[in-house]
Amino acid sequence: MSSIKNVLYFQSGLGVLENVFLLTFYIFIILSHRPKPMDLISCQLTFVHIIMVLSAGDIWFSDLFESLNIKNDFICKATFYISRVMRGLSICITCLLGVFQAVTISPSTSLLAKFKHKLKKYSIYAFFYIWSFNLSFTSNQFFSVGAYTNVSETNQMKVTKHCSHFPMNNIIRGLIVTVSTLKDVFLVGVMLITSTYMVIILFRHQRQCKHLHSISHLRASPEKRATQTIFLLVVFFVVMYWVDLIISSTSVLLWLYNPVILTVQKFVVNVYPTITPLVQIGSDNRIINVLKNLLPKCHQTF
């Protein structure tokens, strides 16, 4: 089991390093240049992924709180609440990223075109509503989880070293799972719709470029690269999300958590925030150019 935990530590450490680098880059872009709305959204997503990796799976935050001699009940409630808020923010901001990119590449004749020049203003409003919604929607975690008391009569479901789910009425538990699932299914549906729309737009654009014998321009299009990146992130997120949803929903409804399945879920939860920065770094020419300029300086130093 210790070797599996080492894998989780390596995965989360790698995810934090990648996202910190990406966050530093976006902060530099936002402060020193005129940022695009997509940069603001990507910066938010990167920050959320840093906290998500640190809080997911009872790895980093729990160890930090434990070293500060904080009571187990607070450790449990804090880590569960933060991880669930970050998970909700991740799906909302990923969905927002897809919607904004769909608006950005929409043709001038499209109904979405009229929103292009207001994206920056809309992104500020969207951030406010997304954060407010997730902070309040996840507040039930304060009442449904707590420190594991090792008392069999309470029928607690232990899920981490410190934490357990408290038993609750089956109707209430089913209602919470249903509402959460419907919210996530709606957001995933929006992602799939915007992704399909972007694929259609790219296909039409490519066909027009072939007709005009200017396919080289298409390959060099920043919009195309950004759209392909976001499409890849959305598809990858949807796959990882459904794996996590199946594991967590089944475990809560059956009131049973297997340690092996829990470990797999921890790994799955961290896959998306770990892979996302690699995809973003590899597809953003601005980051690639910065790295190319840094490499010769590093060689000269050594």
Image: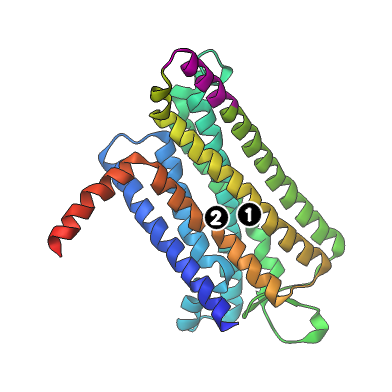
Q: Measured along the vertical axis of the image, is residue 11 above or below residue 205? A: below
Identify the element where label 1 is drawn: helix
Q: Nearer the viewer, residue 11 or 209?
A: 209
Q: Is residue 248 magenta?
A: no
Left or right, 299 with respect to 88, comes to: left
Left or right, 232 with respect to 283, comes to: right
Q: Quadrant of residue 289?
A: top left
Q: Measured along the vertical axis of the image, is residue 247 above or below residue 294? A: below
Q: CA distance from mark 1 to mark 2?
A: 7 Å
Note whether residue 125 is visible. Answer: no
> Where does the image place residue 196, in percent across and percent down from the top left?
63, 31
Q: Which residue is mark 2?
A: 272
What residue is rendered at 40% in x and 47% in y? 282
Looking at the rendered structure, the kind of residue marked 2 is Tyr
What residue is rendered at 53% in x and 71% in y? 8
> Where does the image place residue 73, in percent across and percent down from the top left?
61, 77
Q: Quadrant of the C terminus?
A: bottom left
Q: Quadrant of the N terminus?
A: bottom right
Are the residues at dot 1 and dot 2 in contact (C-beta closer than 8 Å)? yes
Q: Quadrant of residue 175?
A: bottom right
On residue 200, the disc is none
- Residues rendered magenta in the picture: 200-213
On residue 240, the disc is 1
Note whether residue 194 is visible. Answer: yes
Q: Specify the farthest residue to the left.
A: 300
Looking at the rendered structure, the kind of residue marked 1 is Met
What residue is rendered at 68% in x and 61% in y? 140
Tag 2 or tag 1, which sits nearer the N-term? Answer: 1
Left or right, 86 with respect to 223, comes to: right
